[in-house]
Image (tube, rainbow, N blue to C red):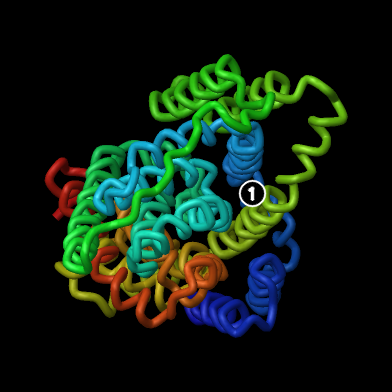
Amino acid sequence: MLAILGLLTIVLLLVVVISKWMSPVSALILVPVFTALLAGSLERLPEFIAEGLVSIAPTGVMFVFAILFFGILLDAGTFKPIIRRLLNFAGNDPLKICIATAILAMLIHLDGSGAVTFLVVIPALKPIYDQLGMNRLTLASIVALSAGTMNILPWGGPTIRAATALQVNVTTLFNPILIPVLGGLVLVIGIAFLMGKKEKKLLLERGGCLNLTKLDEKESISPEERPGLFWINLILIVVAIGSLISGIAPPFVIFMIAFALALTINYPKLSDQKVRIDMHAKEAMLMASILFAAGCFTGILKGTGMMEAMAEAVQDLIHPQVGQQLPLLTGILSMPASLIFDPDSYYFGILPLLSETAAAFGASGIEVGQASIMGQMTTGFAVSPLTGSTFLLIGLCGVDLAEHQLKTIPWAFLVTLTILFLSVVIGVISV
């Protein structure tokens, strides 16, 4: 009975979220409450919800302050000098422009927001692509691959969701796959090189290229872009990320302190601080509300025993050899899964079941989570029709969704498989 109710919970979540009958926040709360009542767990329902919220609180706090931290640094113009230097480095060489596009998108996506990345990078580079006669699909593809791979970072939405669903620390999930992810980022730059080489060849075949005027690195420097603040902000980023990866303190502590320092240093006036916080509060609180609602969802499913019952039922249906390879199979299918499942439905509905099932066969549930973030709404998020960011990207670039998917999906799948392969080689994903 519990297994059937658990399956009903996941199916209802998928239906109401994908069909947009409910917001993810409402669905994550109301659907499990409804099925818990059917299971006769009314008296212990508050206890289950409380346990779920307690387990998720550190991750939710970390995400809020990480968004605020990188948002403040972006507002302060920390990346503008880097953008100017990258564009001057690129000049009028399509190959260098493509490489600069990849690096720029990776840097801007440090804040974990696809929308911000696209709004900053596309308007800055589209005029250059147009002047040189370069294909806008190349711009869309490189930005999508760069932002998608960077979305695996510990404060990225998919990784946060995976850690929330599995009730583990984000560093536990991310740190073991750091080297494979770096390998994926190198591959993205390599892909940008190949695309740039092709664009350069086509440009030369059309009779050369235009001479673009280089940017004046000294012009329009705002007070927030003073060299002293630039280096201080850069040091803050390096120290925060280094501390996170080294594990010297819990992630939420690191980003709370980093945010407070960044805000105080860049905006000493209280009135300015309020404005900056208000600018990013909406995005931070929206995701935080989803995370806490997910704590309610997983708390109820585990507390009532639905998750364990479903895992036992699935265990009877799957061959042991297949069950033991669930992490590997999850990794292979993770990127294509972005075209079928939105992030909330997958990470809060499908991932916990996969993890419990893998554990029942002696495989690692954590590895299933790590395999998931190698593609599900990471490398695949900017080609998925289930996210608004994809339509923002193609809208800014002025390209067709089908053409963008046709060009980008094979490369995105290759990046995911490369990260998965490197993870297998170093022993993070067992085979």
Q: Up-down: is 413 above or below 55? A: below
- Tell me the quarter of the image containing the C terminus: bottom left
Q: Is residue 296 left or right of residue 392?
A: right
Q: Is residue 79 visible?
A: yes
Coordinates of residue 347 in the picture (x, y in percent):
47, 63
Report how many numbered discs are placed on residues in the image. Answer: 1
Out of 123 and 62, give the one closest to the viewer.
123
Residue at figure coordinates x 34%, y 68% from the top left: 135
Out of 51 and 399, give the one closest to the viewer.
399
Q: Which residue is mark 1?
A: 51
Q: Up-down: is 240 above or below 99? A: above
Q: Is residue 186 left or right of residue 103?
A: left
Q: Is residue 299 left or right of residue 203?
A: right
The residue positioned farthest toward the right in the image shown: 271
Considering the numbered disc 1 on the image, is that residue within a helix, a strand or a loop?
Answer: helix
The residue positioned farthest toward the top in the image shown: 228
Look at label 1 and name its amino acid: Glu
Residue at figure coordinates x 24%, y 51% from the top left: 95
Q: Is residue 36 visible?
A: no
Quadrant of the rendered image containing residue 66: top right
Q: Up-down: is 245 above or below 405? A: above
Residue at figure coordinates x 25%, y 38% from the top left: 179
Coordinates of residue 124 in the picture (x, y in percent):
51, 51
Coordinates of residue 171 in the picture (x, y in percent):
42, 37
Quadrant of the rendered image containing residue 381: bottom left
Out of 303 and 138, give the one closest to the viewer.
138
Q: Is residue 74 left or right of residue 103?
A: right
Query: Mark 1: few, some, or many residues within 10 Å (few <14, many ≥20)?
Result: some
Residue at figure coordinates x 56%, y 31% from the top left: 78
Coordinates of residue 18 in the picture (x, y in percent):
56, 80
Out of 352 and 405, give the one closest to the viewer.
405
Quadrant of the rendered image containing residue 202: bottom left
